[in-house]
């Protein structure tokens, strides 16, 4: 049997690294990209992965890195669009000059990955695109307006691709974790208030909890993978309506001739 392969962006730390470790422990071939070369070297000293200096904001770099990892005509079984950044604080108190970078990493990076990845995923018999959203993809906290805007975008993009990538036999899943104990929680707001301190009374998950959800997504057929009490409750409130609509939409979309379907599966 061919070894299955997963590529994870922002995989040198936090949730990405925990996911890399989990899949590697099951015998998968694992590639991780990250902008932080020192963190990539640390990751490679902990787990047997192939590392790539890769900035998700750069489309040409996406093609290059996936060609290196998969081979020019090769297949990819799972692509995890994981790289992301968070800003904490009220939008009107933040420096607008910082907004574009957050949108570029959290939204443009996922758009680029979803575009560059699909032809490789289509060459797998069971290709799956996993986008890391957030609890903030479902409900937007007032101190995370910018972040939540980008994470709602990730959920919207993923919902559309769940249908659109039926043309290529590629499944799409969105992971929606609540707070996770990673360096992301160390953000300060413009007044010096620390996010980790601000949320200390709330549920905090481990990166391994989220890695387990990515594993389920790679092997399941759901779209929403909430992790933690709040997102689980929010998803359960919309689940019946969402799943009924989704199965109907998938059936309708799959049944319709797709004049624009490209032959990338062949
Ligand atoms: N930590 C949480 O509470 C939490 C909750 C819900 C969702 N998430 C999401 O999970 C994902 C991973 O977050 P994390 O908590 O592991 O954060 P993290 O800060 O520990 O890791 C993010 C990684 O992304 C890398 N990165 C940053 N910019 C990049 C770029 N332009 N190109 C490639 N890599 C880049 C960083 O170097 C880092 O290794 C993010 O999408 C985040 O929004 C996190």
Image: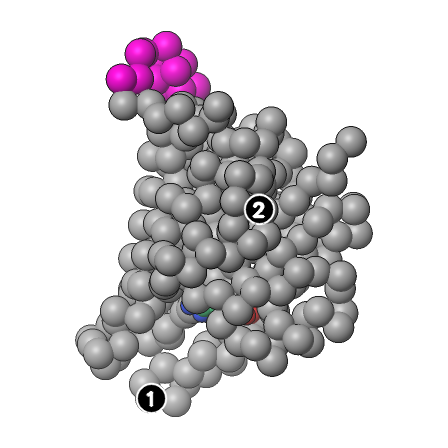
Which residue has dot 1 on it? 191
The magenta stretch is 246-259
Residue 229 on the magenta segment: no
Q: Residue 157: which quarter of the image?
A: top left
Up/down of 232 relative to 165, above or below = below
Precedes in sequence: disc 1 or disc 2: 2
Q: Position of residue 198 (x, y in %)?
A: 47, 77
| In this rendering, position of residue 26 left or right of residue 153 | right
Q: Position of residue 243 (x, y in %)?
A: 44, 25
Residue 251 on the magenta segment: yes
Q: Position of residue 93 (x, y in %)?
A: 23, 80
Element assignment for label 2: loop
Up/down of 242 relative to 42, above or below = above
Residue 159 in view of the camera: yes
Out of 255 and 36, give the one closest to the viewer. Answer: 36
Instruction: Determine the residue positioned at 79% across, 46% down.
Output: 27
Which residue has dot 2 on it? 71
């Amino acid at each position: 049997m061919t070894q299955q392969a997963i590529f994870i962006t922002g995989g040198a730390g936090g949730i990405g690294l925990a996911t890399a470790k989990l899949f590697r422990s099951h015998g998968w071939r694992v590639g991780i990209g990250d902008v932080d070369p020192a963190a990539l070297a640390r990751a490679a000293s902990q787990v047997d992965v192939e590392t790539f200096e890769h900035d998700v904001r750069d489309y040409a770099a996406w093609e290059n890195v996936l060609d290196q990892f998969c081979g020019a005509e090769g297949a990819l079984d799972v692509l995890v669009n994981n790289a992301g950044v968070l800003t904490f604080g009220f939008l009107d108190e933040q420096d607008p000059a910082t907004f574009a970078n957050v949108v570029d990493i959290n939204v443009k990076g996922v758009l680029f990955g979803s575009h560059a990845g699909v032809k490789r995923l289509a060459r797998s018999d069971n290709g799956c695109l996993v986008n890391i959203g957030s609890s903030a993809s479902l409900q937007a906290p007032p101190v995370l307006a910018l972040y939540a805007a980008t994470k709602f975008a990730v959920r919207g993009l993923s919902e559309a691709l769940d249908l659109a990538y039926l043309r290529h036999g590629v499944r799409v899943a969105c992971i929606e974790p609540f707070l996770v104990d990673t360096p992301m929680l160390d953000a300060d707001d413009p007044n010096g208030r620390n996010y980790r301190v601000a949320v200390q009374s709330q549920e905090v998950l481990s990166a391994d909890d989220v890695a387990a959800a990515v594993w389920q997504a790679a092997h399941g057929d759901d779209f929403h993978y909430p992790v933690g009490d709040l997102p689980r409750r929010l998803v359960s409130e919309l689940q019946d309506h969402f799943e009924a609509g989704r199965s109907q939409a998938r059936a309708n979309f799959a049944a319709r001739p797709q004049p624009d379907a490209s032959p990338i599966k062949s």
